[in-house]
Image: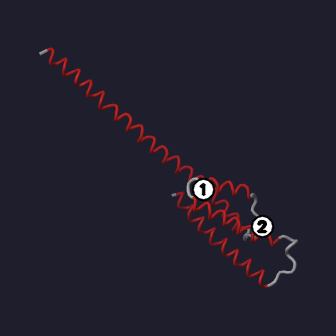
Amino acid sequence: MEANSILIAVGGWIFGLISAIPIKFGDGFIKEFFHKRQKLRNKKEELADKLMDVCIEGSNSGWNVMPGSQRYIQRLAAEIEATDNEVSKKLQHYLNMWCLCAIPQKTTFAANFTREDIEIATRWQNEAQVLGEELLAIARGWKK
């Protein structure tokens, strides 16, 4: 009888060890998965704040003043590209439209505007406004 109980105890210990190994590895994979997910969410929230700042800066100036730092916006676009390539392209297009709107406002270009020049600038400003609103909507979605 004593041999039977020793055999049962050893069998239980081996079964416990064998069943604990996959559970331990599985637990590690699950924790790693949720850690990466949380890290990506935090990064998106941080990028959303920066994206909102850029869009608000452009709209507050009416896209008539050059961006404070084009390098900063290009870096932001590169960071966003790691998570969402389409948003990065929109941000780069937004920056281009902003610069196109702002360049003619400089004093060297301000003389001799034609009606055609004003219509083109108005189209650029409208396009920049639409892009800015789309980017703000995306940033709000990232913040949820």
Q: Is residue 22 left or right of residue 77?
A: left
Q: Is residue 63 left or right of residue 110?
A: left
Q: Residue furthest top?
A: 2
Label 2: which secondary element: loop
Tell me the kind of residue under disc 1.
Answer: Glu
Label 1: which secondary element: helix
* Residue 24 at x, y percent in the picture: 37, 33
Dot 2: few (<14), some (14–19), or many (≥20) neighbours within 10 Å?
some
Which residue lies at the image location 62% right of the left edge and 53% below the top edge?
79
* Residue 10 at x, y percent in the picture: 23, 20
Tell me the kind of residue under disc 2.
Answer: Val
Q: Is residue 114 left or right of residue 42?
A: right
Colouring chosen for the image of the structure: secondary structure
Residue 18: mark in rendering: none
Q: Which residue is mark 1?
A: 81
Which residue lies at the image location 39% right of the left edge and 38% below the top edge?
27
Dot 1: few (<14), some (14–19), or many (≥20) neighbours within 10 Å?
some
* Residue 34 at x, y percent in the picture: 45, 45
Residue 65: mark in rendering: 2
CA gap, disc 1 and disc 2? 26 Å
Please state which of the two labelled residues, at mark 1 or mark 2, is closer to the viewer. 1
Tags 1 and 2 in contact by the CB under 8 Å rule? no
Which residue lies at the image location 37% right of the left edge and 38% below the top edge?
26
